[in-house]
Amino acid sequence: MGDLPPRYDGTLHPEVWVQDLRFFCALRGIHDQATVLSIAILRIDHNILIPRDIDSFNSLVSVLKDHVTHSVFRAVSLEKLNKLKCESNGDISKFIAKFTSLSSNANITDQEEKKSYLLRNMPNDIVRDVLRSRIEKLNSFDKVIETFKDVMLEHRRQVRYGSKIALKHVVTGRFLSCIKGMRYDTGFKQHMAFCNSWQPDKLQDLWIVIPACEQHVKSGNPVPFNSVIGLKHQQSGLNLHSHDIDSPPTKSPVTKQQEVTCYGRVMEWNGHDGPPDVNDNWLLQRHSTTSNYDNSGYWEVGDIISLRHTNTKRSLSSHDFMMNNGFQEVTCHADGHEENHKEKILMKS
């Protein structure tokens, strides 16, 4: 049947079918419009009655749109549009192509109605609310689509409560890590926090961004700079932790700086509440070599950050000093302005 022109049976838009048929005829050197029209009428399902006086494609398309099969086609397209979902990490261009096609098939032409369906298709309320505020006064749907693209790309870059991240120490290029069951021989003998590989290990190097102790934040909310947060190690369920260096024995094993550990009751994050220990709290800031911080906006993948332990006011740090097991020591040290305090995310899910 590949040598026959496309058949119309009401399961696609009449104008799309006409375009396909004209393309078929053009490929075969058939350009006379009366001949193309005759071929088109012959390729319409026999249950769809076509008046004998049809003399143009415009009138043919009008007849096909008035037929009950097209009414069913529009209803099915509307149902598909209602079920359409823009996935957070899906292909934006494919989504827009599908949305535009289904909107046309469902005969949705009013711009405000199209906005309403687009908002309904968003992956979550956060994206929906941001997009709504930005397209409310737009009069061009091309600009609406452009804005949608910007919002989705912004959404993907942003770190959110519940995001799983791999945190890279900028100077040494190694990722913050923990191994369940591996403890310090010194200090309180809690689980080690260390830097190890130059490529993120999805088992050992992933951390879940959670709210600070006794704070309640909805999973999926973006994380503003200057927020106090927690980091829960995904594999072990323990929290990134530190404690006062003036309360021995809490010095790091190599450089005798403030010890950083992974600690806490092993538990799954419930999606809202932070950890139960204030020593698991870290202040998120853009890295700065001075005390002037640009803490505007939200945390995004690639931002150079510093994490300051809120109880002791010392910042998460690492360096080329290795512990006896060959792993790179992680400590808390100074006020966060040094190169060794720089961290950034290279992976987020």
Image (cartoon, rainbow, N blue to C red):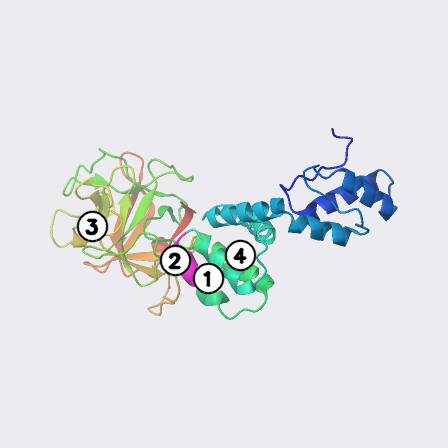
How far is the residue under mark 1 from the one under mark 2?
Answer: 9 Å
Q: Could you tell which of marks 1 and 4 lies nearer the N-terminus?
A: 1
Find residue 77 and report its horizontal and vertical position in percent: 55, 47
Dot 4 amino acid type: Lys
How far is the residue under mark 1 from the one under mark 3?
Answer: 32 Å
How far is the residue under mark 1 from the one under mark 4?
Answer: 10 Å
Query: Chief secondary structure of the magenta span?
Result: helix
Q: Could you tell which of marks 2 and 3 lies nearer the N-terminus?
A: 2
Q: Could you tell which of marks 4 and 3 lies nearer the N-terminus?
A: 4
Q: Which residue is mark 4?
A: 149
- The residue most toward the top is 1
Answer whether residue 6 is visible to the viewer in this image. yes
| Residue 202 inside the magenta-drawn segment | no
* Horizontal side, residue 66 vs residue 262: left or right: right
Answer whether residue 302 is visible to the viewer in this image. no
* Horizontal side, residue 18 vs residue 113: left or right: right
